[in-house]
Image: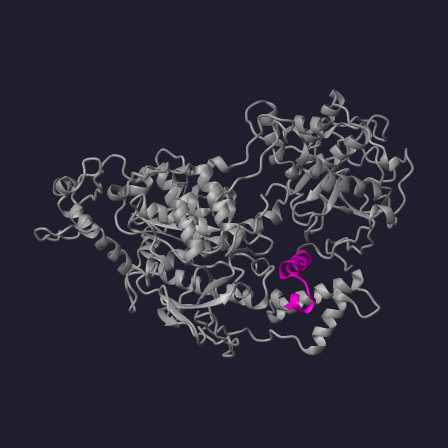
Amino acid sequence: MWQRQVGVPGHTGRDARADRRRRSNASPAPAPRPGERLTSDAVSALQGSAGNAAVARMLRPARPSTVPVPVQRLRSDDEEESDDEGQPAQQPQQQAPAPNPNQVRAGITTLVDNPPMVNYGARRQGRAHGEFWMRFARSKQGEEAEETLSETSALLFDSMKGAQEQAREEDPEHTAEDSNNREVQGMLINGRLVFASNYNSSIDTLVERGRHEVGAEPTFGELLEFEQSDAALTRGLREHEAENVRAKLASFRRKNRAIVTGQRGEGEQQRGPDATAMALRAKMDSPVIVVDVEDPDLHGMLTDEEHEGRVFLLRFAALDPRAKKTGKNKGQQTQEGSVHAEQKLLLALRRAGIRPRRDVRGPISVMGKYRPCMGCAAALMYYRERLDFTNLTFDENYGHYFQGSVDSLYEHQRHVMDAHYLEYIRQMVAEDITSTPAMAHEAAPQGAVHRRGGPSLRVPGAYASRQADVTPPTSDAEFDEDDTYRRITRPLTDTWTTETASAGIGKGSATHTIPRRRHERLTPEQQTELRELWNGRPGEPPTNASRRQAIELADRYNARDQMTFEYLAKVVALHPDRFNGYVARFRDRGHWKHVPTRSKKVETGPKNRKKGAVEKQFTKGGELDQEGMDTIRAVIESLGDDAWCRDWRRADDGRSTGELNATKAPDALLRTLAELRRDHHYSVPSLSKYLHTGANGDKLRKAIQRKGEKLLARREQSETPMRTEDIEMEDAAPIKTEEAEGAEDFEMDDEPWSVPAGFAGGSSSSMTLPHRPGPSIGIGEAGSSSGTSYRDRPREIGGYTLHVDPRTGQATYIDEDTGYEYVHVDGRMVRIDRGEDEDVEMGGSRGRR
């Protein structure tokens, strides 16, 4: 009685939910006539109306005492609920023991690893049937809440990707790597919205960027303002796929705009009421709430009236990276874990102890940008059918099968892995086929049938979409000059031809026509070219270069002209999966490099370097000593109130814990570290430990290599003469120069400063100084022309940023407005120009380069 009914229309809105409630009522008991033998149907009806005891009394005279009485229990609507509601229902009595989770997982593997399931993309795109139901745009009448939930999830998905893109640009070292399998799913429950992604870092990065932009906890609307660049949005997509993604996101944003302006969601313009839209509008000015699956207050957040209209972003802390506790890599951070977003939402219901009949008021829906995979669809079905979430709606037109989905269920929700879940998978594999979406603008061609709420067409797997998006709606939104929302029907175009495949008569099986994409056939000349490039000509075997050219042609024919690999592989007499693998590898990594066998190995690279060559020598660095610590501390102290240096002082004093970001260390410090590494061979781990940037020093090593070494090389290579420019500090002309602006407010220090030889006191003319390390301009030292020793630290000057070279003691000032570099000489700010010819007017205006 728990098996999924195949062939019955699936998720079709409120009517389907009402039908499921009607089916739960007991049937009336038939009145048996005297002497008539009860059938099994009559027994079931009696059990539902009169109860098991009455049935037993009626059957006892006609049955031997050893025959067990059939037992079935149906709970009436007004029956008091037990405390274990939401737990799996009791298994029916069976002769064979119920399979354990290990056996269930093994059984699923056996089902999906055999026909009719096949691999796609060398299993990178999972497994699916050889044929698909291609679902075309349809009306979502009666599914308004599900439609808005799916479209809002797609917008949030784009915002997460946009935040990741910005974070990578600003801090490539610290940002988590983006992945192709990121997704977003939303859940409507009790008038509030919960969104989950499969990676915690997607939510963390988005919220962090939102806080940075608004300076406070962001609202959901503020988070949706993040968008991907067009280059990132369309990367790896074909032209028609890119246009499809752009058009859908633009439509979703127009609808969201109508919602937040209060014009959409209340059943307007022949559209039904939209619970998701009303939840989005309820508390738009309230910040989002980031909550963990394990939060003890999660039950209240999902059920109490105080949180109605709030938007939650769901995390699962068990997936966060953590230090390994054993093994040779002890202490090393693990990779971030993930689960499919639908499973994270179901896990929240489980961990929060949500009882469906007591704690859920109104509809509950789980929808996202993507349709659920086969494993997640079966889990959603399990919660609805077995755990009594009868109002749960989701997209029953599932996509591909991914082993990772079942593995994460086994790890985190093992209560689902029973015979019922296995049966759901079996029916999906054996009695149904995978679904795939058409483009949003594509009209259903001739030959399409009405299935599960909309037009569908059975097509070969080669025509399946590379994106497993939810079936698009036919509706759209537009605004007039007064910013008034109007609901419209999006125009659809016929991109499928009416040309059909040849139809033949088989062994009594019905045949159907399959419209073909345009440009699916090669010309005879193209076939000959491709065949000869791959297989060679008579007397001329193929070469690596010719086969590479054939792969490039096949890639172009497939991407541009939509030719399938089944067709192209026949031209070169190769198995389709193998030919597809060659092309897929070319797309991902380019052409492979031919490696000859060992017996005929030919050296194509340079000979091995002679042992003992300098570039091959490696000397393990030593521990940081007191001299190195003093040098580093002097640099940090010279940088004054730098934010990174303040954090280091707190960490060094024990006032704070955690690691500092090595990539954000000041340039002067990174340059000094590079010099210490080169001259004193300090090990990076010892440097990193002292600077509190991590135990192993990997991040500090990258920062030194990418920034510090370049800064050091730039300083040492700048041996060319530099031109200086004098700027009057107190006796300047009435017209202020840009360089001197802001420098007139400070008072001259009574302590004398040394002037290098060659500078005439009070002179305002330009002169050339050699740029070399050593005694510096602006800081006197013993033996200088002034005979005075330098102070502990040069003073700060308004409008300028002070920098002190820790190695030479050179003090320089950076103009905060122009970025020019100056030294302070005898009451004047002398500008340093490193090696570029520039005409400078002494009145303050710049000459042209």
**The residue positioned farthest toward the top in the image shown:** 626
Residue 704 position within the rendered picture, expressed as x and y whole percent measured from the top left: 72, 37
Q: In the figure, residue 171 lies in which quadrant?
A: top right
Residue 473 found in image quarter: bottom left
Residue furthest out toward the right: 610
Q: Is residue 75 left or right of residue 749?
A: left
Q: Is residue 465 left or right of residue 307?
A: right
How many marks can you see? 0
Q: Is residue 718 above or below residue 151?
A: above
**Screen quadrant of the C terminus:** bottom right
Residue at left offset 37%, top offset 72%: 488
- Is 738 situated left or right of 773 in this image? left
> What percent of the width, then of the height, locates residue 212?
51, 45
| Colouring scheme applied when the structure was drawn | one colour
Front-most of residues 288 and 126? 126
Residue 290 visible, this angle: yes
Q: Residue 427, relative to residue 320: is it above or below?
A: below
Q: Residue at x 86, y 46 (%)?
A: 599
Question: Viewer-proximal residue, 594 or 758?
Answer: 594
Q: Any magenta on residue 302?
A: no
Residue 12 placed where, x, y %? 32, 61
Residue 443 figure quarter:
bottom left
Q: Main secondary structure of the magenta part?
A: helix
Inspect this view and state whether residue 198 appears: no
Magenta segment includes 585: yes
Residue 296 in picture, x, y percent from top left: 36, 33
Q: Which range of residues does the magenta coloring cover?
A: 568-587
> Along the horizontal axis of the image, is 784 left or right of 232?
right
Residue at x 80%, y 55% (from the top left corner): 838
The residue nearer to you, when weighing 647 against 622, is 622
